[in-house]
Amino acid sequence: MKASEIRKAFLDFFAQRGHSVVKSSSVIPHDDPSLLFTNAGMVQFKRTFLGEEKRPYNRAATSQKCMRAGGKHNDLENVGRTARHHTFFEMLGNFSFGDYFKEDAVEYAWRFLTEDMGLPREKLYATIHEGDSEMRLGPDEEAREFWARYLPADRILTFPTKDNFWSMGDTGPCGPCSEILIDQGADVGCGKPGCRPGCDCDRFLELWNLVFMQFNRKEDGTMEPLPKPSIDTGMGLERVAAVIQKVPSNYDTDLFAPMRAKIAELSGYRYGTDPEKDVSVKVIADHGRAAAFLIGDGALPSNEGRGYVLRRVLRRALRHGRFLGLDRPFLSEVAVAVMESMQDAYPELLESRNFITRVIVNEEERFNETLDNGLRLLQHEIRRLRDEGAGTIPGALIFKLYDTYGFPIDIITDMARDLDFKVDEAGFGDLMEKQKEQSRMHWKGSGEREVSEAYRQLSAEGVSTRFVGYESLSVQSTIAALVRDGQSVEEAPAGTDVEVVTSETPFYGAAGGQVGDQGVIVGPSSRVIVSDTLKLPGDLIVHVGKVESGRLRVGETVRLEVDEALRGDTALHHTATHLLHSVLRRVLGDHVKQAGSMVAPDRLRFDFTHFAAISRDELAEIERLVNEQIRVNRDLQVREMNLDEALKTGAMALFEEKYGDRVRMVEIPGFSRELCGGTHTHRTGDIGLFVITQEMSIASGVRRIEALAGRRALDYLGRQQSVLHQAAGLLKAGPFEVAERVEKLLANQKQMEKELEALKSSLTGRRSADLLEQAEEVGGVKVLVMRVEADDPKALREMNDRFKERLSSGVAVLGAHQGDKAFLLVGVTPDLTSRVHAGNLIKEIVKEIGGSGGGRPDMAQAGGNRPEKLQDALDLARKLLRERL
């Protein structure tokens, strides 16, 4: 049975038992500030389990894309070296939200494994929680009773809390677990006499974990039963496929066969002939798969957060490619094998093929530029350390490799392990902390605002806000809640900051890059100035404002009025963003994907994937095409439909958005089609004008365009024109002659600067000639120790050069000052460097002026911040030279 058939059979099995089959959420979580990656099937249901969100179903089944690499789930080191470790994997899971509980969960798992998958019943075991005296919990006898219907008592085993109890955090929903294990036979295990379930070897393999969420852990640690116990289960597709396909490793399943075949084609190496090279094949296959899914879901390589994890994954795969003789970019071809083999389950991968491969190739080229130099340095240093009898690679070297050559520490760790060296990870960590104290691990999970307890409670109580702002900018509604300083309150007096939740609102809550609306809320005896509007999980829209007058109370009927002018300006900037996105793909290529945006009344900012600077001509063409679409004056069409239906139309879905089953599609007929919940103009012509103000790089492979639309664009061009006319007036030229006139002025200035430099050089030469007359003879050597007029160290160097030109043998010590800085220079002709070392001499005299410096035997410079001591430094130089000459 192929893995794709197992996945389908699992989802079909639970669909037949009343479960809604829910599409996998992104591997990058969009509403969980605590997570770097989606690492389990329950992540997209977390708020449902917490009672903060209600779904239209109470049973669900999924095959969830998961990633465990980075943070506390740092499995990267083991990937490729064990049969089961992966970065990316698929988690099959079934869930009950207060519906069925242990009895059905056990039955479903047993029937699926034994009847649908045909696993031998005599080889299966179940584990249950043995109880915990600290938690005042006895053994899970209820689970034992249900398992006893299918298994003999000696194959129902008890395990402690660390193995068989699950919790979402220090407080909240939790409960005992029950794991299903399969005995793969003695030949698979460690061979030890005491080998039994719980052994670290592969004989008794964990297949499926059933979590019985039945308690709520309170702040004091006590457990209270949940009113509606729930079920959360997880089974790794790769693992169950290996068991059903009767292969010793997950990497031997059909899931990895296309990647193995592609690697063999590219490298010429046949998997299974060399254990160490097999490790490299596994690493490349796993990491190529992870990279395809991560990039497909919007991650981009960077030096922090999830982008750093992706970069580590990519670079570790590239290094293992070199072990197989792959010195050219190759990983994008492995990623294409992933896309083609997974297209039935994840068609979006192949749809983003160009984008994914461009990101990977770009990173490969960047890394290959530095990898050779870094590897040479590491190998040289390891040889040196070995010669010195050292057995540890120091943290300072690791940091240099990371900082200068982009080496992730795991690459160095792998090489060190192969050469029997240890790694000073602690020293490396200290240096990283010093360099990136605030940013090294500065990721914020999904980037979402952390929801306060007050709003969690409101969601749990079923409070939500209906948005009516597409149809109206002014409505009457009832105040459902008031929040101050994170706490729910019943009223808010004049002068206080307050957050207001109403049952309906025309105010758009910040989402999808569009900022929140501003306006006023007017009550029977109060007025609130709304400065921002937020959209929180659970369909809560929060108006952030200040009570200008009166007293606002929960339950009052109020009028909510959006600032129409600001909303209008925001809408035209949002529609302009859609036009810009479509134009960028036409001009630059379909690898362009939105990587972030900000749409406000006064400007727009659009981040997108592209791997080269945009030329001035390309920017002009982009701006021209957007304005052309504005003049065409197309009607916008907005439709609500099912997500799958919308995607079939070719509508673009954006990385940073989380979509429900029903979506809103904004179409500019014949030009653009995007899923978007934002507010827009009625026609493109309403925008009026579009102007690009800035274009820049903000990260590797990510560019940013800032632009203005409508009256903001007109104001910008007006200011620009005013400055142009002002410049033309100063230059006594017409506006169209300004550039030519400035070019001539700059050419004249450059010529004058050259002439000035020539005069300075001539003057320096004359000064040097005059200075030579003041040189004294010490021990038969011409010595010049002199305070001179010089603007900077460069002028001192020029004087020294003239001195050497005119004097075949001698020593010069020159000093000058400019403002609160003092400069020193020591020059020695080559024949005297054995008697006077310029660098050593200057180190001795520079202390007088409170500075430091050094240099070569024939020339050295230094500076200090005590110009009043300059003469003392020169006197000391004269004294030292008399002693040495």
Image: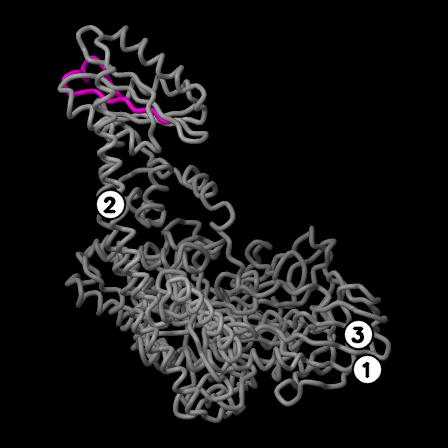
Residue 245 visible somewhere in the drawing:
no
Q: CA distance from mark 1 to mark 3?
A: 12 Å
The percent coordinates of residue 606 (x first, y second) are 45, 71
Q: Is 270 left, or right, of 568 in this rendering?
A: left
Q: Is 521 left, or right, of 95 in this rendering?
A: right
Task: State the residue at coordinates (14%, 17%).
Answer: 831
In-front residue for pair 148/110: 110
Task: State the residue at coordinates (36%, 81%).
Answer: 624
In-front residue for pair 681/375: 681
Circle 1 or circle 3, nearest the eye: 3
Which residue position holds label 1? 557
In what element is the residue under mark 1?
A: strand
On screen, residue 854 above or below 320: above
The percent coordinates of residue 828 (x first, y second) are 21, 20
The three-letter code of the residue at mark 3 reads Arg
Tell me where residue 701 sits by quadrant. Answer: bottom left
Q: CA distance from mark 3 to mark 2?
A: 68 Å
In what element is the residue under mark 2?
A: helix
Disc on res. 754: 2
Disc on res. 527: 3
Task: State the residue at coordinates (37%, 63%).
Answer: 731
Q: Which residues are magenta?
A: 823-838
Which of disc 2 and disc 1 is earlier in sequence? 1
On screen, residue 799 above or below 639: above
